[in-house]
Image (spheres, helix red, strand yellow):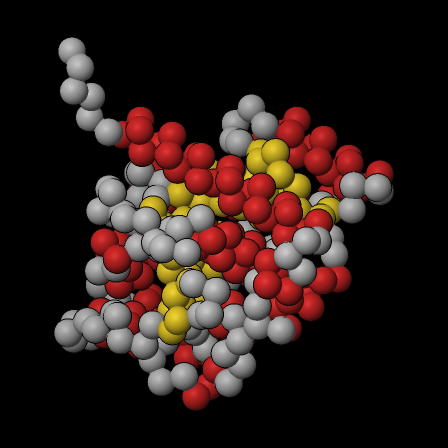
Amino acid sequence: MSRTLNVSGQARIIAIANQKGGTGKTTTTVNLGVGLAKQGKRVLLVDADPQGDLTTCLGWTDQDNIPVTLATHMAQIIRDEPLEVRNGILHHDEGVDLIPSNIELSGMEMTLVNAMSREYTMKSCLNELRKDYDYILIDCMPSLGMLTINALAASDSVIVPVQAHYLPLKGMTQLMKTIGKVQRQINPGLKVDGVLLTLADMRTNLARVTSDSLNQNYGKLIRVYKTIIPVAVRAAESSAAGTSIYCYDRNGVVAKAYEAFTGEVIRDGEKKRHKNEPSHSR
């Protein structure tokens, strides 16, 4: 499929974030990214987790031997060295690009503590790439440390995957407080695009109660996506195979759900773009 032109000239940067692990952040990043690429969008995925799950899920399993990673670029910014951020971008067969990560990124948390403008290091890296893409998706680590703060500072908006269990839902309060603090102190333009219910077995009472609770507690404050991502073994298998769910099980329920979710994200982005375009009528 041919790629569409980036009419605005600026990529929309979205952080996929939740400090709770196991909520489907990486799976969502991969399948939203590939879903956008299938719609002709130019997409860059950024692995902002030292565990490198996104890098592994896209098929680069020998992470320690990847010469250029996100940590490389952030170190260049901190040391005030010339930034070659396009160097080392990996290209996946399904039409998305990747800035990979490995364990080297774990040392960045401590390094950032003493860095000047420490919250904006990742933003400095990604701003160089805005004109090259339509969407930049950041897969955040499961914590609210400096790397996640950097991702939120670099982003236009946040998508929050929430597992269909009660306890992960409780952690939403802490995440929303962190996002609010970033909005007030670092990135006033940051928006919450919405909450995505993942790993849901809607045949169970627990999943239905969680969905209802999510809508009741947060539905008036932030968007809860209509799409619900079902739990399925095939989704986990696709990650192990280094492909998206579209390639691994294109007719399955998870592929259809992520396709619907991608449509919601695109429509949401178009609404935001039209809202921000200057009016020529009087």
Residue 112 in view, yes or no: yes
Apparent side of residue 84 relative to residue 26 in the rendered image (left or right): left
Apparent side of residue 13 relative to residue 210 in the rendered image (left or right): left
- Residue situated furthest front in the rendering: 1
Residue 71 in view, yes or no: no
Q: Is residue 119 above or below residue 112?
A: above
Q: Residue at x 63, y 52 (%)?
A: 255
Q: Quadrant of the C terminus?
A: top left
Q: Quadrant of the N terminus?
A: bottom left
- Residue situated furthest bottom in the rendering: 65
Q: Residue at x 38, y 60 (%)?
A: 44
Q: Position of residue 81 (x, y in %)?
A: 16, 75
Q: Position of residue 250 (x, y in %)?
A: 64, 57
**Number of marks:** 0
- Residue situated furthest right in the rendering: 204
Q: Is residue 229 above or below residue 145?
A: above
Q: Nearer the viewer, residue 188 or 241?
A: 241
Q: Position of residue 258 (x, y in %)?
A: 59, 48
Q: Position of residue 70 (x, y in %)?
A: 36, 71
Apparent side of residue 220 relative to residue 73 in the rendered image (left or right): right
- Residue situated furthest top in the rendering: 282
Q: Residue at x 75, y 62 (%)?
A: 233
Q: Residue at x 52, y 60 (%)?
A: 30
Q: Is residue 53 above or below residue 65?
A: above
**Quarter of the figure with residue 26:** bottom right
Q: Nearer the viewer, residue 171 or 45?
A: 45
Q: Nearer the viewer, residue 140 or 13?
A: 13
